[in-house]
Image (spheres, grey):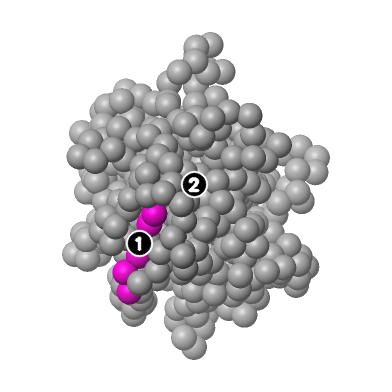
Amino acid sequence: MKTFWAPHAWLRREGGSLTAVENDVRIDVDAAGRISAITPDSGPAPQGATVLTGLALPGMANAHSHAFHRALRGAVQVGSGTFWTWRDTMYRAADALDPDNYLALATAVYAEMALAGVTAVGEFHYVHHQPGGAPYTEPNAMGEALIEAAARAGIRITLLDACYLSSGFGEAPNRHQTRFSDGSAEAWAARVSLLKERDHAKIGAAIHSVRAVPEQELGAVAAWAKERQAPLHVHLSEQVAENDACLAAHGVTPTQLLARHGVLGPRTSAVHATHLSEEDLQLLTDTSTVICMCPTTERDLADGIGPARRLASSGCPVSLGSDSHAVIDLFEEARALELNERLATQRRGHWTAAALLRAATEDGHASLGWSESGRLERGALADFCTVALDTPRTAGQPPQLGAEAAVFAASAADVRDVVVGGRVVVRDGTHLSVPETGRALNEAIGALR
Ligand SMILES: [Zn+2]
């Protein structure tokens, strides 16, 4: 058993859904890595307790990641271009990956996530095979590298293994995409079924997009996830061109095509969901599909602003992801939801800080199958982080406004401590197993050039 003590913590009020900042909070963790007791107003830190800094928050879930996209940061900001020219650059990075260099890169990227307060990542993984498409001797060598990387960085992972079979509607994979493809959904399912869950790792499914999985194969991926009650994620309507191509090929929108094959539902996360028709909105609402927003990537790629507020108001849970890792900062993702709405509507006050934190924590974890994490309460997994309230960005307000300060002003650099399953992963802003995280990123990304 371990004891932690935080000067402040963002807690749910006993028996209610309202959250508030409480003071002098003692957090007891049992040998299984769960919170056995949580006690506000507990007095000074007890002897032997690990004393945390600032405001304790539940661990954050990065619900949508492609770890290798981290290698593109900065490089894709030179000159102009579109989503599609960005994608060409991304494919060149994918060409350079192998299981060893991906392990090194993903370990450093997940360490960066841990430093940002992330305790679980949803890794939407599609670089499965060797360049050219031949399988590795270990058919899941790349997925295993990602699972191992999360272990080394001390965070939980849901490996969302993506079915990726075509380049577009009725088009074979191009030369970059051959290593993404298993040839059929059946072969995809046979390979993914070999992956084993671990204490820190869950296995989920993904449909890359309606561009990448032919209509007749969609049902097989949905059935695999349904049989295992596993999370199912899908990129949805990120670009208008995807909708136009789907309408031309099938006469329906991507959302309608997914609905036709049983892909939507409460275990499913629709990633981006940017360009939707009224009927699409209704289908997502009727099926309680989770909406995963990635605002820093969506603005980086000039995707547009999706109807997250409207979908949330009609009952769809919302999660957040850093996707292409233009930045890795869940506070930035969270406030972008509200700030985007302000720009689009010329009004303020669409999302409270508490609602945004819930998306970044509880609902994000649930979308990845970690429904016992993302809350600071008795019985939950002991996954939490702290944000300092005395930095140049967060100082100046009473701790009772700590949630607002964190969501609307903090950066990932203000995260001080991160605990996953009761184990300290980040202490006073340093990652304990990857202490030189910047250097690890430099070396791993440099090795791809
Ligand atoms: Zn993505």
Give the labeled residue for mark 2: 7
Q: What residue type is labelled 2?
A: Pro
Residue located 56% across and 18% down the image? 343
- Up the image or down, 208 lies above or below 8; here it is below
Tell me which numbered mark, 1 or 2, is placed earlier along the sequence.
Answer: 2
Does the CB distance between marks 1 and 2 fall below 8 Å?
no
Residue 356 visible: yes
Residue 253's image quarter?
top left
Q: In this view, does 420 lie to the left or right of 194?
A: right
Residue 221, position as x, y percentages in the image: 29, 60
Residue at far right of view: 79
Give the residue drawn at x 43%, y 21%. Answer: 350
Q: Is mark 2 within 8 Å of ligand 1?
A: no
Query: Where 137 falls versus 236 (above or below)?
Result: below
> x and y percent of residue 334 in the render?
50, 36
Taking depth in this image into account, of 196 and 83 the one nearest to the observer is: 196
Q: Does the residue labelled 1 lie within 8 Å of ligand 1?
A: no
Question: What span is in magenta?
Answer: 26-31
Q: Residue at x 71, y 37 (%)?
A: 392
Q: Residue 92 or 158: which is nearer the viewer?
A: 158
Amino acid identity at mark 1:
Asp
Question: Can you name the residue that lies furthest to the bottom here?
Answer: 137
Residue 87 location in percent, x, y?
63, 50
User: Which residue matches tag 1?
Assistant: 28
In this rendering, the answer to whether 147 lies above or below 18 is below
